[in-house]
Image (cartoon, grey):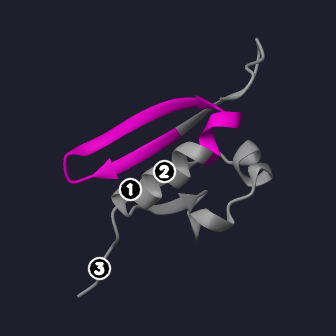
Amino acid sequence: MCQLEMFEKIITVKIISIQGHQNFYLVLCEVKEFILNQSKNFKLWLYVDGIQIISSNLASETLSSARDIILTSALVGG
């Protein structure tokens, strides 16, 4: 668990699935762990500002400056 500051920036993480999408509003110290857990447990891909990132290589600095964070199921072309 992280120590929360009164005016800490809230970061939105969007999870997109066949059921629609869900928004999660988290503080920075919670985001990385949330993304790692979701990626591992549900095999989701991570996109930060439109660029796919391997979740295990995610840096906190990337998250703090991100405008758009999306987790989604693997995309398969045909």
Main secondary structure found in the magenta portion: strand
12 versus 71 height, above or below: above
Which residue occupies the foreground of this view, 63 or 57? 57
Measure the C-alpha gap from mark 2 to mark 1: 6 Å
Q: Which residues are magenta?
A: 13-32
State which quadrant residue 11 falls in.
top right
How far, Cα to Cα, is label 1 from label 3?
19 Å
- Image quadrant where one finds the N terminus: top right
Amino acid at the residue labelled 2: Asn
Q: Position of residue 60 (x, y in %)?
A: 75, 49
**Image quarter of the C terminus:** bottom left
* Residue at (68% x, 48% y) in the render: 66
Residue at the (53%, 29%) spot, across then down = 25
Q: Which mark is residue 76?
A: 3
Residue 2 lies in what quarter of the image? top right
Residue 54 percent location from the top left of the image: 58, 70
Write down the residue under mark 2: 37
Amino acid type, callout 1: Asn
**Mark identifier at residue 73:** none
The image quadrant of residue 48 is bottom right
Task: Check disc 3 and report its element: helix, strand or loop.
Answer: loop
- Is residue 62 found left or right of 68 in the rendered image? right
Query: Residue shown at 58%/63% (left/top)?
Result: 55
Q: Secondary structure at mark 2?
A: helix
Q: In the rendered view, would you say 61 is above or below 54?
A: above
Mark 1 or mark 3, which has the lower sequence index? 1
Query: What residue is shown with label 1?
Result: 41
In reply to whether residue 6 is colored magenta, the answer given is: no
